[in-house]
């Protein structure tokens, strides 16, 4: 079986690449060649920018694939390009959408693949929805062999998954926890969330590749473990062997501070979500997510703390955190109290 991954070296796709190699697939990766350390031994790298369609088409000339999976398609423009590139040269095209596309606010926290798609808070999610619509239209019109996969919060070795962090990632939050400094948790921390280790995601994803029953279908792939955000941060602190000093800030206040928080929190992480994985388990018999968050995050922390390239400082976010916590405390102190 022959597969082409567009990207193939990111958090999700690197785990998929590694597992495909173990399973004996003939694996090609098409990317710009900037993360060579995450390319599994034996994979063939086609160095190209997928957005340079003429160059990509020339380098793919004469090749045909059982499965093509694009991990870096985000807009309908990208989908139009992929349909033109891959129609007729693959038996299956997998689009990586996002579970953030599901209805926000949710009418029910239990999510199935039939949950409506609607996200007024996040353009990223609306673009993914538009991509799905374009692909389903192509499937219905010309039989374009699409499979849609919706990951939720999937993490691997290189970054600790948290709710509120800056553009440089979560290391600055980890450093604050290690130093005993306060960190922000959105809302009251009681909403439920699902973290999925990338090796668990890869097991289900690879089970869909080359799977004739997956054509024209949509699946989300997540763990079955539900954790509150308080538990998530407490688990990280426990893995670091330090107490957690958390400050809870209302989500709408955080959203007002940054458009990125509006999308990532109001449009995703602030909502309690419980995923029903019946459909993916039916399509991939025997699939089960087996990496508990406390186990996976210890592995991630070990990697991050032993690899300086993962320890990106974020002084702007750090200063913002201190200022928000200070100002919020002052405002809270000025609130009037009732005499009963």
Image: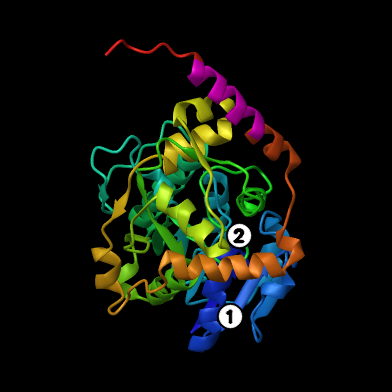
Element under label 1? Answer: strand
Percent from the top left, x then y, of residue 173?
62, 48
Q: Is residue 248 above or below residue 3?
A: above
Vertical arrangement, residue 278 with respect to residue 109, above or below: below
Q: Position of residue 23 (x, y in %)?
A: 48, 87
Look at 55% across and 66% down and name the residue there.
156
Question: Is residue 331 on the magenta stretch?
Answer: yes
Specify whether residue 12 is in view: no
Question: Is 109 in the magenta?
Answer: no
Which residue position is annotated with label 2? 159
Residue 225 location in percent, x, y? 33, 62
Pick whichever, 214 or 187, lies toward us: 187
Q: From the viewer's side, name the closer residue of 25 and 221.
A: 221
Pointer 1 residue: 27
Q: Which residues are magenta?
A: 322-333
Q: Nearer the viewer, mark 2 or mark 1?
A: 2
Q: Is residue 42 visible?
A: yes
Q: Going by the image, does 245 lie left or right of 129?
A: right
């Amino acid at each position: 079986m022959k597969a082409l991954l567009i990207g193939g070296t990111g958090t999700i796709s690197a785990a998929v690449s590694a597992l495909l190699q173990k399973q004996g697939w003939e694996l090609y990766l098409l990317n710009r060649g900037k993360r060579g350390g995450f390319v599994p031994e034996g994979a063939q790298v086609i160095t190209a920018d997928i957005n340079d369609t003429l160059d990509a088409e020339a380098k793919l000339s004469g090749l045909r694939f059982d499965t093509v999976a694009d991990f870096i398609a985000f807009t309908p423009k990208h989908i139009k390009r992929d349909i033109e590139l891959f129609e007729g040269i693959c038996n299956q095209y997998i689009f990586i959408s996002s579970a953030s596309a599901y209805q926000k606010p949710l009418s029910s926290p239990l999510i199935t693949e039939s949950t409506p798609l609607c996200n007024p808070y996040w353009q990223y999610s609306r673009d993914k929805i538009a991509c799905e619509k374009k692909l389903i239209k192509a499937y219905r019109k010309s039989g374009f062999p699409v499979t849609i996969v919706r990951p939720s919060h999937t993490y691997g070795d290189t970054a600790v998954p948290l709710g509120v962090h800056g553009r440089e990632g979560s290391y600055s939050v980890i450093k604050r926890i290690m130093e005993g400094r306060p960190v922000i948790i959105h809302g009251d921390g009681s909403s439920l969330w699902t973290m999925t280790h990338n090796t668990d995601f890869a097991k289900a994803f690879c089970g869909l590749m080359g799977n004739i029953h997956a054509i024209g279908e949509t699946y989300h792939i997540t763990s079955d473990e539900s954790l509150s955000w308080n538990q998530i941060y407490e688990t990280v602190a426990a893995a670091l062997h330090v107490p957690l000093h958390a400050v809870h800030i209302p989500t709408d206040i955080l959203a007002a501070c940054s458009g990125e928080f509006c999308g990532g929190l109001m449009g995703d992480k602030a909502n309690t979500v419980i995923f029903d994985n019946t459909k993916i388990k039916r399509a991939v018999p025997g699939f089960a997510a087996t990496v508990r968050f406390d186990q996976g995050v210890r592995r991630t922390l070990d990697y991050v703390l032993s690899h300086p390239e993962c320890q990106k400082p974020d002084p702007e976010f750090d200063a913002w955190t201190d200022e928000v916590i200070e100002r919020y405390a002052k405002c809270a102190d000025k609130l009037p109290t009732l005499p009963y």
